[in-house]
Image (cartoon, coloured by chain):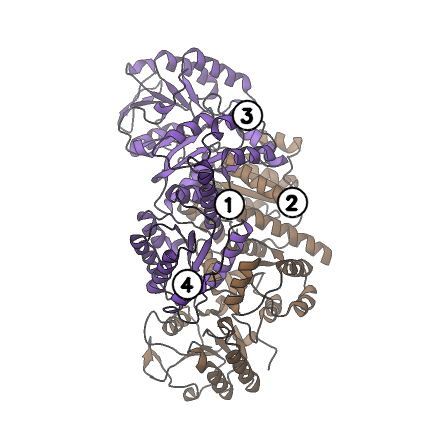
Chain colours: A brown, B purple
Amino acid sequence: MSSNIDFFFEPESVAIVGASHKPGKIGFELVRSILECGFSGEIFPVNPKGGEILGLKVYKSISDTSSKIDVAVIVTPSKTVPNIVKECGLHGIKGCIIISAGFSEIGNRKLEKLLLENAKRYDVRIIGPNSAGIINTSANFHACLEFRVPKGPVSLISQSGAVGGVMFAMARAGVIGFNKFVSCGNSCDVNEMDVLKYLLRDEETKSIAIYVETLHSGRSFLESIRKFKGLKPIIALKGGKFSAGLRAAASHTGSLASPYAVYSAVFKQCGIFEVPSIGSLFSSAKISAYHSSSNGERVVVVTNSGGPGVVATDMCESLGLSVPEPSERLKEKLSTFLPSICSLRNPIDLTAMAGYDWYFNTLKEISSSMEYDYILSICVPPSFMDPMDAAKAIVDLYDVYSEIPVIPCFLYGSMVMKSIKYLEKHNIPCAYSIMDAVYSLKALSYFGRLRGERS
Amino acid sequence: MSSNIDFFFEPESVAIVGASHKPGKIGFELVRSILECGFSGEIFPVNPKGGEILGLKVYKSISDTSSKIDVAVIVTPSKTVPNIVKECGLHGIKGCIIISAGFSEIGNRKLEKLLLENAKRYDVRIIGPNSAGIINTSANFHACLEFRVPKGPVSLISQSGAVGGVMFAMARAGVIGFNKFVSCGNSCDVNEMDVLKYLLRDEETKSIAIYVETLHSGRSFLESIRKFKGLKPIIALKGGKFSAGLRAAASHTGSLASPYAVYSAVFKQCGIFEVPSIGSLFSSAKISAYHSSSNGERVVVVTNSGGPGVVATDMCESLGLSVPEPSERLKEKLSTFLPSICSLRNPIDLTAMAGYDWYFNTLKEISSSMEYDYILSICVPPSFMDPMDAAKAIVDLYDVYSEIPVIPCFLYGSMVMKSIKYLEKHNIPCAYSIMDAVYSLKALSYFGRLRGERS
């Protein structure tokens, strides 16, 4: 079998085996997704009934297509899959993305073995089975059960389609999204290590998020990935940490997981930053993708709201980030335009009275002081403030000083949606919660240190 | 001074001293908020310029009003406040909510002392200074700088207006919100203990959320509150935990805080459940308000998405909740209608194929089995599913079994907004993240145990 898996992401043609005529069915929605997301290659729906789906001719079998096809997406019942893989191989298809479930994840290891034997014999690479599909937004290729996702620099490897689905929905709350997504499913052939090595080489991928329950190749993973330590930001969320979680992970992807401590150790040795939640996985990957040359651990919190500033400071300290007071010199500079109701001790509390000028001038003085490595800029608009004032101040600051990352954390929901979209449209990634913001800062500091060790 | 503070929440008439004619100014927006939220009492804007604001006659001074007024909201510059408090007292006003900042929080202790002396001499109770105001949604009374908030059974005491603002915005993402809100500010007179005792008596308040940086009465707080242990759910977020956070809290509300460990100990002795984030403060308070008779620590996770189910299980275990497997008997029952692709081991993974029937029948069998104390019901809709199916299954379940709390966690954002609103309209409070859901479950288990000890 080819060790190259690039063709999965940029196929010139794709078959959907198990395409359905019925809206709402997976086999229909997959065809619709591939079509509506603007895939420019040829699409071959396959279903013994023939006919048409969304204006596309339906072929009765793979061999009926009599065309060169790169990749087949398979959604037929599990017992039919090994034979379809054989057919695909005979037809010259290089890879199958198997969405169908009902293999080792429910104890049906024999069927999965048969599938893999056919794949090897007929020279077909497999993603899955029990995969939620793959996405490459650069090629407008969306062969995936999850909802659409905005484009962006983050790529995601996930042993759960739904973890992808949640992160894609988070991306839609802003502007910045994903480049590639692979749901490895049971990883019977292509596994997370293969995809990770591919993404480390992929120029469009600026950071990599991983949701992993089981590493299918513990020691070789460590050996292969360790040498790339610090090359690109990699952030991981481990699923299945304790007894019930391990049992759950076993049911989910059909593999037995090692103790959690082993994973944490492997992540550490490979330079992978570990996070505790889906939200922090998304924000850390997104923010690391944009601020990949930052360094240090000194955070200044600039806020218009005391409480959220205090909560952020607590979280920074609990993760080992430093939140030092400004120098007397910097405080003096700030006090030339900030009135005495503002606190200058870090958090810099601009109070609810803050508008564009206070934000802009404060961010500018801090940036030029070189006293901090990161600015966490919190905005909770009171009823008499338009948060766009704070958003514009941050965007305008980047025209003057772009060396120090500013992480905006505007709270919450519809109240700040316009500001978040405005910031992200200007390539300034936002965090949606204080915890997500602080984990992202810690990630920046972690990768900064790794790059220092590498160079 | 009166020890009663009830009048603050149900005034028959209110003055706004420092009312402004200019939209966007605090003194204008406060008048607008009180007016637009449907306050049925009399409103007296006060400004030496006179004129009209939003159709209301503006009085040149408090004494000009020649009417009985219960409460004055003060937004004038700090140095004018002590004298205004005196005027209020002379006019028979019972309490002042002082929004104005510039007192002990910026080191101006002398001015705060003068203010308090006048309050005592002229028999006026004070909320603030440096308060963001108060809200009582039952009386449509919104004397607060923060945006509007939906009604609900949660009351909030906060030493930060903006923590309230964030929680109100979270409430607007659903349907269920707040009953009362008090921003104590510098707490020069009425402090968090006074408000807490009031809310413990208040029949409309079903649970109490507290954001606290400094307890102004450590030992007496402990002594007063401990006897109410387990009476109502009380959930706290402590701001200012470590060195920089403590420094920040000192700047914010002008008080020196004790070490964090002291607070944790006091919370524990008073039966107050501590949470680490604003999101978990909101969801734990909201969910505790509705499920206040639940008990136990056995959680079953019912999900249509493996990964989020595994992450939830991990978090449950890390907080000491139990996620046991169903009995063989229950598994057999479930397997009569769930196909073999579903996992029955807890998490019950219904897979992406789940629709109304699988959700409803699974929830029903679990409820009638009595094997669990709480159901965490996760839904991450894939592209071919309408999450309303899962939402309707939960609402319909409550018509049959309402004993066991079902905590819905639908992810994420606009994809599930309609479902969340539907569930909350039917009085089923939702969590917006897995972490928030799991902290809420832990809160239910915590208060269940306390009630057991109390009875």
Q: Are marks 3 and 4 on the same chain?
A: yes
Mark 2 vs mark 1, foreground winner is 2
Q: Could you tell me which chain the residue with mark 2 belongs to? A: A
At x 44%, y 82%, the residue is A80
Please state which of the two labelled residues, at mark 1 or mark 4, is closer to the viewer. 4
Q: Amino acid at mark 2?
A: Gly
Residue to which mark 1 is pinned: A409
- The amino acid pointed to by label 4 is Leu
Q: Amino acid at mark 1?
A: Cys
Instruction: State the SS at label 4.
Output: helix
Q: Label 2 belongs to which residue?
A: A320
Q: CA distance from mark 2 to mark 1?
A: 20 Å
Residue A158 in view in this figure = no
Per the model, the C-alpha gap separating discs 1 and 3 is 36 Å
Marks 3,2: beta carbons within 8 A: no
Q: Secondary structure at mark 2?
A: loop
Left or right: B409 in relation to A52: right
Tell me, for residue B219, which label it has, or none: 3
